[in-house]
Every structure is written in structure tokens, then in C-alpha cells.
Image (tube, rainbow, N blue to C red):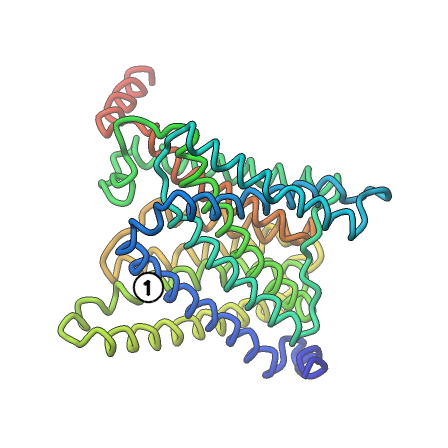
Amino acid sequence: MCASLQRRSADGGPTDAGFVALLALLAGLVLVRFGVGYATGVFRSATGLLRVPALVTLAYSAVALAGLGAVSAAFAAGRDEWLDGDELTQAALAAIPLVVVAVHVTFGRLDVGVSALPVVRSGGYLVAVGGLTFGYARVADLDVATNPPTDDGWLVTALAVAVVTASAALVTVGASLSGWPDAPFAAFRYGTAPSVSSLLLTTVVPVTVTAAGTALLFNGAVQAALRRHRSAAAAVGVVTLLAFGVDWAIAAVPIALSSVLDPVAAPIRWLVVLVAALVAVAVVLAVSVAYGRLWDERGTVSRDRSPLVAAGAGAALGALVAAVGFALVGPDPGPATLGYAVAVGVAALAYERVRSIWAPALVYAAHGVTTQLVPYYVPSDAAGAVVVSVLSALS
């Protein structure tokens, strides 16, 4: 089976078996997204259980240990002398009780009153998507690039994070100053900004964990597989369009069918929505693969030096389709579409340059955290009129 997935088709693109494997991977993602959504609803009904101090301590201790492991791996990258396997195991066993005690004492001192739900939800997503990714990698004989970036890779990653952070912030602030309708920013516009501890525990941690899962699947698995059959530019463009399109399809299908399926019994309604989402994702995959083939066949720009153009074209096409699609099904995502399109494009570019999932994971995390944090500081709608008046007077 591995050999069949590695063979190229007549046009140089993925074989039928390779396409089916990609489709199965994305179908698994749809099931995970729907499953996490359902589980979140169930967990919310058990909010009391998820606020038990012992459970909260264990959940965030697991995240803290994972973070320490990531920092250790990043520090060890490129160094000849570091802890061997036995020493790492001993250090981990020694760190576990210390971290658990430290988290418990910290929560007691801060009295933040957090729930374990954000960690359970994002952690469940990461575990499920990680299982899909490494299962696909085993079948397709891929090596998932989980190693930390090199020194140059960190510079590229930092630049990508800065670009996406600035883009997300400008999109959010610009939407407010231009008087964009209340949705989708009004839900995030609070009177006061959250405390640092609350922001870290309820936003930064779960967003970063979720971002790692997204980077694993789309960049570590899909982009690496596409790179076998397509140029760097085409692979970047395809994964940009695919990541954006799949996310849009999963979000849009339930909205589009909600009014039609309201009278239908819940089990049948969920089954129809699930099947429709799977069909939509299959269409997105087919369109994305065709986009990559067209990009390479046309050869209008250098296949070796145009990943930026390919990512931009893929992001623009995805944003256009999403904007039109959301306009047809109801809610208007507005500038948020542009911000996410930039994020997926930059993530694909960063992965192609760095060849490590750390780069796109940090890019996705920066976009998610910025999108949720900046609206706390967005001026009121009235500020837009003031700015316009001042600029008019100066011109």
C-alpha cells in the first residue's frame, strides 16, 4: 500500500490511491470537528465536574508538562550534547510531581476559577488529529517534520508570526473603525480586558494546542504529501486553498442546512449535515488538487520561485469563495475571512521554508490569540466617525 501511494499518476499528480487517502484523512478531520463540537456541548452540561480543582490541576499540569517538553526539545535542537533517553525519562518523572504541585499552588493563589473545558476540548482535538496525521503518515510512508526549526528557521518563523499578528490586528481594528456591522466582533467587545492569568489559561493555551493539531494535519501530512507530486509553489497554493476551504465547508454546511432541517429529528439532522459536510470537503479537495495541477501545467511563473504568488492566489480564491458562500447562506464573516486567508497562506509558506510543523503551529496560534485578544481593545463604533472626521479635516 505504501508503494502505491508513492507512485505518481500520469500527469504527475497524486494517484487515485493517494487522493483517496487524502480524502479519508480529511473525512476523519470532519468527524473529529463534529465530535469535538458534540462533546463540548455534553461537557458544558457537566460544568461542575470540569471545575473540580483536582481535575483542573491535572488538565493544566499536562499542558505545562507538554510545554516544558517543547521548550526542552527546542533547546536541544542542533546541540550534540544533551540528555540521553534514560536521563530524559528520569527528568520527566522528577518533573511531574513538581509541576502538579506548582500548578495547584498557583491556581490556589490566583483564584482564577477556571474550568478544564478549554484544555479538554483542545487537547481532545490535538490527540484525535495527531492520531489521524501519524496514521496517514504511516500508510503513505511520510516523515512528519516534528523537529524544532534551526536557527535560520526560527528567524523565518518569527517573521511569519509577526506578519500574521499584524494582519489579524489590523483586520480587527480596521473592521471596527470602518463601522463594520456588529457581528462577528461584538461578541468579543467587553468593557475591560481579561487578566493576564485568565487570558493565558482560557485563550493562549487552548488556541495554541488547537493550532498544533491544525499544523500537524494540513502542513505536516497534507503539504508533505503534496510535495512529492507538485512543485513547492503548487503545494503551498494547494494547501492554502485546501485548509481555508475545508474550514469554511465545515462551518458553512450546518448553517446552510439549519433552516431546512429544523423540523427533522435530531439524529437524522446530524447525519444529513455530516454527509453534506463530507461531500463539501471532497469537492474542496478535488478543486484544490486541480488548482495545483493547473498551476504546474501552466508554468506562467517559475515553479521553483513562486510559492508566495501561489499562496496569495490560493488564499484570494479561498477568501472569495468563502465570502460569496457565507453571503448566500446567511451570516457575513466580513474581514475575518481575509485575516484567516492570510494566516493559512503564511503558515504554508513558513512550513515550505522551515520544513517543521513548529512554524505553521506558531503562525496559527498567533492568529488565533490575536483575533481573540485585540477586540478587547477595539475602539467603539463611534471612534470610526471621529477618525474619518479628523482625516477629512487634515486632507
For mark 1, does the 10 Å Cα neighbourhood hold few (<14), some (14 to 19), or many (20 or more) residues? few
Q: Position of residue 318 (x, y in %)?
A: 44, 58
What is the quadrant of the N terminus in the image?
bottom right
Residue at x 59%, y 58% (from the top left corner) = 219
Instruction: Tell me the amino acid under the disc marked 1.
Output: Tyr
Residue 270 falls in image quadrant: bottom left
Q: Is residue 178 above or below residue 307?
A: above
Q: Position of residue 114 (x, y in %)?
A: 37, 40
What is the quadrant of the C terminus in the image?
top left
Q: Position of residue 287 (x, y in %)?
A: 48, 71
Residue at x 27%, y 32% (from the top left corner) = 190
Q: Is residue 347 above or below residue 164?
A: below
Give the side of residue 114 with respect to residue 187, left or right. Answer: right
Q: Nearer the viewer, residue 394 or 197?
A: 197
Give the side of residue 345 with respect to residue 86, left or right. Answer: left
Residue at x 35%, y 62% (from the top left corner) = 39
Residue hosting label 1: 38
Q: Is residue 233 above or below residue 113?
A: below
Q: Position of residue 95 (x, y in %)?
A: 64, 41
Taking the view exactly as shown, the residue that stands out farthest to the top is 394
Residue at x 64%, y 45% (from the top left corner) = 70
Q: Nearer the viewer, residue 140 or 91?
A: 91
Residue 298 falls in image quadrant: bottom right
